[in-house]
Amino acid sequence: MEILVCADGDRVQLCELAAELTPETTRTCTRSELPLVMAEYESASPRWVWADTAALAPELIAAGVRVTRCLDLRLARTILRHAAPDQDWPDLGWRTEPLATTTPDPAVPTLWDESATTPPGNTVADLVAERIRQRDAVGACSEPARMRLLLAAESAGALIAAEIEADGLPWDRSVHEALLTEVLGPRPRAGVRPARLEGLAAQIRKHLAAPALNPDSPVELLRSLRRAGLDLTTTSKWEIARLDHPVVGPLLEYKKLARLLSANGWAWLDSWIHPASTPQRRDRFRPDYVPGGVVTGRWATSGGGALQLPKQIRAAVRADPGWRLVVADAAQIEPRVLAAMSGDTALATAGQAGDLYVGLVEAGIVGTRAEAKVAMLGALYGATTGEAGLLMPRLMRAYPRATGVVEQAARTGEHGGTVRTWLGRTSPPPPPSWHERQAAASQPEATDAVERRARQGARDWGRFTRNFVVQGTAAEWALCWMGEIRRRLAGYGPLSERPHLVFFLHDEVIVHAPQSHAEQVADEIRASAAEAGRLLFGRTPVEFPLDVAIVENYAEAE
DNA sequence: CACCCCCGCGCG
DNA sequence: AAAGCGCGCGGGGGTG
């Protein structure tokens, strides 16, 4: 059963859809009544169909309602529009941009007020029409069943993102603050450098004989470094690390600490760490995930930087007392996904050693694990030079099917074509400027420089499409993995004692679980990985092993 | 002051 | 200048 939810201001309409998507009974309630009304229906596990999970789920979750499944028409539309660009997709006025980082002040009028108060595509009839349009678009896909799985997984992801934001990642503020004070010195007044940074800045100025230098300014820093006789073109740390000069040590240290201060310092703590709801719990970091925010299907974030949480501060991620963090990451997910989608049994076999890179060494393809990794990443990213470029031919000889898939994707992209992930997410076409550049190169009067730029542009786009098929399919696997984890954990009793997802990082999850359930949860996560493989690829020799750690704080999981 | 781009670096 | 993909974020520095 599907139930459409159409929210317009304070009025909500619920409409059951029959098998052929014909609207049947419609029920109206207020927004505040919605969670209770939905809870009534939820025992029958309907599929809730709505325009935008992110707009509706937070208030449902706050009211204690966690639905089993939904279809997010906005996310589905984005995928289907690219899959079926020739179909008619009338403008519904739906946001395609990520949510704003901060809640806008309603007193301040904005350009979007008009569209925000009267969304044009948000009547029951609009939603029903869109649901039918999407069903037809799915039917026209070359692999409708895969597309249906993708839309279900994407929608489950939207629910998970909303739940993670509501539940939050348990955070120990005092651990974080102690770490900041230890390496930076005591918290200074706003706008003042912490003592340790100021000390390093003084050393840098002395070594470079530049008394007024602001080391935060790359322009000033580069000028001072060059004036000191150092041959540099940028101030990046890998270039500085090569120099032989007394300034190197303090400068690299300064950069590291300045980064910590600006990205995850006291200001970040103040704006992103929310106080505990009860004394028995820790504080919470509430990441603002944006499902489908990356073209490949990966999640993005909007504020908070959850996808860049540095290893340096992971000790501050601490389970509540009596609870544990079950940290799981998928080992070499991209090559494994490539093995599965290409049907490369030789690569699948290499992955059965546990560590796929070790498997490559044991198969005699390369000499060391490090070489295996460089070669494989080179194949996935399109390396042409350096060590990866040299190792590539061996990989292509050993795994022609797997490498053939990414090579073919690259050729398609170089010619301006689009490629698809395993479940059917389509890459964006190159922009008009790309075509203009190609066209310019085919003119008879085209100069060498014009031709070179066109060739460069073609190769660049080829590397993008090459990586798209693998990164995108890995993202699909991860969505299915998480969806399955969520489904299994839903049976673990009342919300307050239930293990729940608290973090996601492309190929890694953290589940916050009562200590007594941690081992069992680890098993559920492993079983979910295997299930994700089956959901996507059916029977496949490819294994999807995980590294799982049950820890008190995230840093222990390394 | 708001806005935008670049740089550099964090993550996978 | 990270050889080779995808991102977000903060600070500097320029522009209107």
Image (tube, coloured by chain):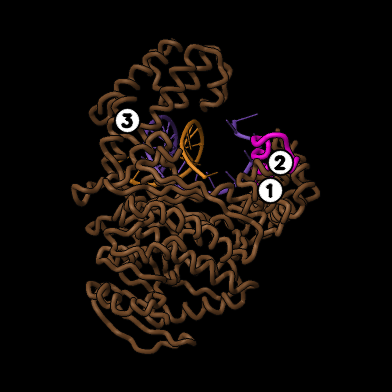
Chain colours: A brown, B orange, C purple
Q: Residue at x 48, y 64 (%)?
A: A154
Mark nearest the camera among 3 and 1 is 1
Mark 3 crowdedness (10 Å alpha carbons): few <14, some 14-19, many ≥20: some
Residue pointed to by mark 1 = A350
Discs 3, 1 touching: Cβ within 8 Å: no
Whole-angstrom CA distance, mark 3 to mark 1, is 42 Å
> Would you say A182 lies left or right of A393 here?
left
Residue A139: x and y, percent? 59, 78
Magenta part of the chain: A361-380
Whole-angstrom CA distance, mark 2 to mark 1, is 8 Å
Q: Give the residue type at disc 3.
A: Leu
Whole-angstrom CA distance, mark 3 to mark 2, is 42 Å
Task: Please give the label number shown on residue A179.
Answer: 3
Q: Nearer the viewer, residue A352 or A224?
A: A352
- Please check whether the numbered discs 2 and 1 fall on a single chain: yes
| Pointer 2 or 1: first along the chain | 1
Discs 2, 1 touching: Cβ within 8 Å: yes
Q: Nearer the viewer, residue A341 or A539?
A: A539
Is residue A335 located in the magenta-colored stretch of the structure? no
Residue A284: x and y, percent? 29, 48
- State which chain disc 1 sits on: A
Residue pointed to by mark 2 = A362
Q: Residue at x 40, y 60 (%)?
A: A160
